[in-house]
Amino acid sequence: YVPETGPRVRVNQVGYLPNGPKNATLVTDATEALTWQLKNAAGDVAESGRTRPRGVDGASGQNVHTIDFTAYTRAGTGYTLVADGQTSHPFDISGTVYQQLRSDALQFFYIQRSGIAIDGDLVGDQYARPAGHLGVAPNKGDTDVPCRANSCDYRLDVRGGWYDAGDQGKYVVNGGIAVQQLMSSFERTKTAVTAAHGAGLADSTLRVPERGNQVPDILDEARWELEFLMRMQVPAGKPLAGMAHHKMHDANWTGIPMQPQNDPEQRELQPPSTAATLNLAATAAQCARLFAPYDAAFSAKCLTAARTAYAAAKANPAMTARDLGGGGGGYGDDDVSDEFYWAAAELYLTTGEAAFLTDVTASKHHTGDTFAATGFGWGSTAALGRLDLATVPSALPAADRQRVRQSVVTAADGYLATLGAQAYGLPMPGNAGSYFWGGNSNILNNVQVLATAFDLTGAAKYRDGAVQGVDYIFGRNALNQSYVTGWGEKASQNQHTRIYAHQKDAGLPHPPAGSLAGGANAGLDDPYAKKLLAGCKPMFCYVDDIESYATNEIAINWNSSLAWVASFLADQEKG
Ligand code: 9MR
């Protein structure tokens, strides 16, 4: 199988900020520097220079050169880069290149909502659908869901929330990081100098049913998930009260396509876990402080859920998730020390109470190396706590604050060094270990750390690193592939999803604009990829086909990474 990779000049197909870094990658046999030309839409040469030979790139196996045209700053559309007889895909140079990406990336969540009709007047008729999983036949849930384990002979109403991904399970450990990144996109605007007091995330900036209610739409969206997460908490009077069920999903996997309202499978609650309980504690604590100005009762409800969850997790610190039946993803996580740190941090930031600070500072994650080279994710959440301790105003002792902030900056320095060493410019090491299931979100999470270092220091190199860090996602890669639907000349559009399964049924839409694909995965963890892509170099281990769930799914925790970064980028636009 030889993928069609188009012109050998690889650019960010969406574009570049006029005052931002502008880098591209040329695939060539040449070992000596070559001439490059930047052409405007009329075909005139706007700028030219010499390529920089970089040798063989570890992740792609290609001989590559880099092209740096940062010095060119004139805005325009339809630019191309020409080198070695090849003309790149067209791109813009514009101060508003990412403006719409912020809302596109966030709009994904409304369209993924469970338990509510999706309104075509808001998001287009092709995405309109009846409410799913409210107990209307043939659905069997989610309003009265039996627990799968013997230890819990009760049923819960766990309606609402977002469908996880291409499947329609709802998993607390994945909902947790996703809703955290939405809330943190908003919380960032309270302190970040470039965020213009949250204007870009204000009420009526998204197409959600709650627009116009005087609450920022991104918080309305987060609330849809937070209400679900709280429903997953074991009620008072039941065994393990205060703990959260790890997940709920179908008893058996369904086929593709499958609209939520047609799902005939029994929905089942899986047993509580410490990891899920700490996800609830952390996100409900963050909820409490962010909703306080808008809805005191909801804020108080969140704080109660957070406190009871945290206490329950401390009383049951080693309840690992057990998988009792099929139809859903595993999301097992044996190490919850990072979730403990994150939850203690959020509770401390919300309440200022000494007991939580003690738990924060006693955690090995408070002093440990929290920021892995390959990024954080649903199973490694200490970075979420660390980033919030670094940015959210609190009475954290000065020495701790200084160290926490320095750790973000030190991590960002590491990511800068990494992206500088990559001919494709991404902040991930250039070996197979960087190319795993959902790795695109880890790249974006490293970009989040770079961006946060900029917010903390104002040093331009971190902003530039964050801006450059997304080039890979939008096409500056071995496959010449943008991984965001609707963004770039050649963009993913056949992601693995039961709802927007156009590839299986032409009457269904592609995923909405702003949907991020999981990305190249050297593990080839699905049969389709395994067969088609056997022997692929890591950066080539991707296919835009609905069958490949391990390289081409969509997921709420991946789009939340995109949303955070897109919001940051939109705030950098100055023309
Ligand atoms: O994102 C998850 C990834 O980190 C795991 O390696 C993978 C295998 O366990 O599962 C991914 O999550 C999937 C989940 O299990 C089911 N819904 C779709 C998720 C994204 O592919």
Image (cartoon, rainbow, N blue to C red):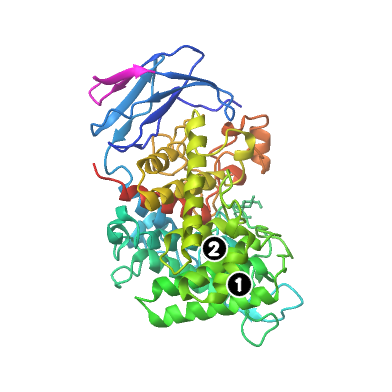
| Position of the N terminus by quadrant | top right
Report which quarter residue 489 is drawn in: top left
Pointer 2: what residue?
A: 175
- What's the magenta bit mostly, secondary-structure-wise? strand
Q: How many marks?
A: 2
Q: Image check: 219 left or right of 442?
A: left
Pointer 1: what residue?
A: 140
Please say if 351 is above or below 477. Answer: below
Query: Residue 353 location in percent, x, y?
Result: 51, 76
Does the rendering let one see residue 397? yes
Tell me the residue at 28%/45% (across/down). 573
Query: What amino acid does circle 2 point to?
Result: Gly
Of residues 116 and 9, which is closer to you in this image?
A: 9
Q: Distance between the residues labelled 2 and 1?
A: 22 Å
Query: Residue 522 location in percent, x, y?
Result: 64, 37
| Position of the C terminus by quadrant | top left
- Report the disc number at residue 104: none
Report which quarter residue 316 is drawn in: bottom right
Q: What element carries label 2?
A: helix
Magenta residues (range): 37-50
Residue furthest right as drawn: 150
